Image: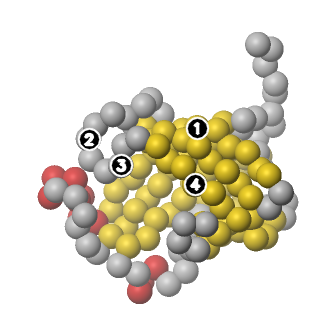
Amino acid sequence: MQGVWNEDSVAFSNKLSNYTRHHFKFTCDSVYIDLVTHSKVNFYEDSCYNNGIWKEYAKGVYAVRGDTLIVGATFTHANYKQKTSGCYRIGRYEKNFLITKRSADSLTLESMNDQREIKLSLKQKVTCIQKEL
């Protein structure tokens, strides 16, 4: 699971009113998430809408239990420092994903919240080097 994983495209994105592309970086026990949202509907004040495309970031921990990926993270700024105000979401990013397919260079997740499928491809391997406490 450790590595940099990208969702290169979203199925039927041209027919959806909004969708999010995911980028995950899994290290020993941490996860860094970049979310790029495309929306035809403005959910935010005009200064945040950014012509319907915006980026969000989250940093946290993850665990794999059986066929489930559990992510507990906090929304951050682009530098992965905690975000407490501003455009888009703040607070916690709590998600569970069903791992439906897994190979050395591809990973398919299904969000347990909305059943949307996320097809990820491995872009870079990450080797875990445990640090002493």
Residue 86: assigned label: 2
Q: Classify mark 1: residues with Cα within 10 Å, few (<14), some (14-19) or many (20+).
A: many
Q: Is residue 110 above or below residue 85?
A: below
Coordinates of residue 125 in the picture (x, y in percent): 77, 46
- Please name the residue that numbered disc 1 is placed on: 60
- Going 43% across and 58% down the picture, which residue do you hit? 36
Separation of disc 4 and disc 2 at Cα?
A: 22 Å
Question: Mark 4 near mark 2, Cβ–Cβ under 8 Å?
Answer: no
Coordinates of residue 38 in the picture (x, y in percent): 37, 67
* Three-letter code, disc 3: Arg
> Relative to residue 15, is residue 34 drawn left or right?
right
* Three-letter code, disc 1: Gly
> Relative to residue 43, is residue 89 drawn left or right?
right
Coordinates of residue 11 in the picture (x, y in percent): 55, 80
Which quadrant of the figure has residue 110? bottom right
The residue nearer to you, when weighing 42 against 55, is 42
Q: In this view, does 117 lie above or below 5?
A: below
- Please tell me whether mark 1 or mark 4 is closer to you in this view: 4
Q: In this view, does 61 lie above or below 16?
A: above
Q: Classify mark 2: residues with Cα within 10 Å, few (<14), some (14-19) or many (20+).
A: few
Separation of disc 3 and disc 1 at Cα?
A: 15 Å
Separation of disc 1 and disc 4 at Cα?
A: 11 Å
The residue nearer to you, when weighing 103 against 60, is 60
Q: Which residue lies furthest to the top in this view?
A: 133
Residue 89: assigned label: 3
> Relative to residue 98, is residue 92 drawn left or right?
left
Residue 95: assigned label: 4
> Looking at the image, is mark 1 or mark 2 earlier in the sequence?
1
Separation of disc 2 and disc 3 at Cα?
A: 8 Å
Q: Which residue lies furthest to the left in this view?
A: 46
> Looking at the image, is mark 4 or mark 3 earlier in the sequence?
3
